[in-house]
Amino acid sequence: MKKHRILLCTILLVLTFGSVTRHFAQDAPTSPARAAQERPLVGIALLRTINTGELGYKHKYGSYATWQVLSLNEANYFEEFLSIHGLVQSHPRFGNAPEILPGWSLRLNVHTDGQGYDVLLEDQTDKDYGYAALSDERGIIRECKWLK
């Protein structure tokens, strides 16, 4: 009788804690909130890719390039970006500025002497905070949002 009681208690404990463990072990679904949190990371990675492409172009040709020239001559950097971020099937190519990818607006200004550039990448889907990232020839990336 005592063995049955211990066995029953053990089974109840396993069922109770087993259901709690299953609840916490589930994969979190990809929610719109999570996707919104990941977009700035993609934006920063894209800005790093642009900075790297500009550096490669300047090393080869002695000056920085506009987006049209850069996206053609340093295409390998941008193809790798699409591949790393799983965007190859949905966005096989970058577009012309300002909207280079759906939801991403780019403003890339090269200085008149070609020895510097300023780049602004804006998330057009962020209607709440107006997320944007900025950089220049130094490779320093800054993030910003609207003031409310």
Image (cartoon, grey):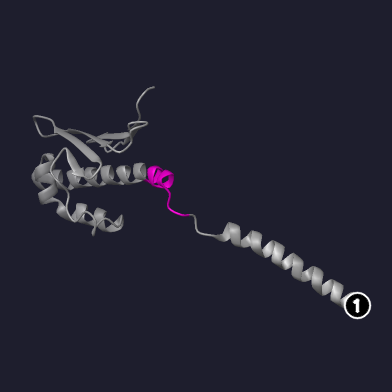
Q: In the structure shown, which secondary structural element does the residue marked by tag 1 occupy?
A: loop
Picture layout, residue 1 above or below residue 95: below
**Residue 113 image position (x, y, % from top left):** 9, 31
Residue type, numbered disc 1: Met
Q: Main secondary structure of the magenta part?
A: helix
52 or 14: nearer the viewer: 14
**Residue 103 image position (x, y, % from top left):** 25, 42
Q: Point out the image quarter for the C terminus.
A: top left
20 left or right of 46 in image: right
76 or 63: nearer the viewer: 76
Q: Point out the image quarter for the N terminus.
A: bottom right
125 or 106: nearer the viewer: 125
Picture layout, residue 106 above or below residue 93: above
- On whether residue 101 falls in the magenta region, the answer is no
Extreme residue toward the right, this view: 1
**Residue 112 image position (x, y, % from top left):** 8, 29
What's drawn in magenta, residue-wise?
A: 29-38
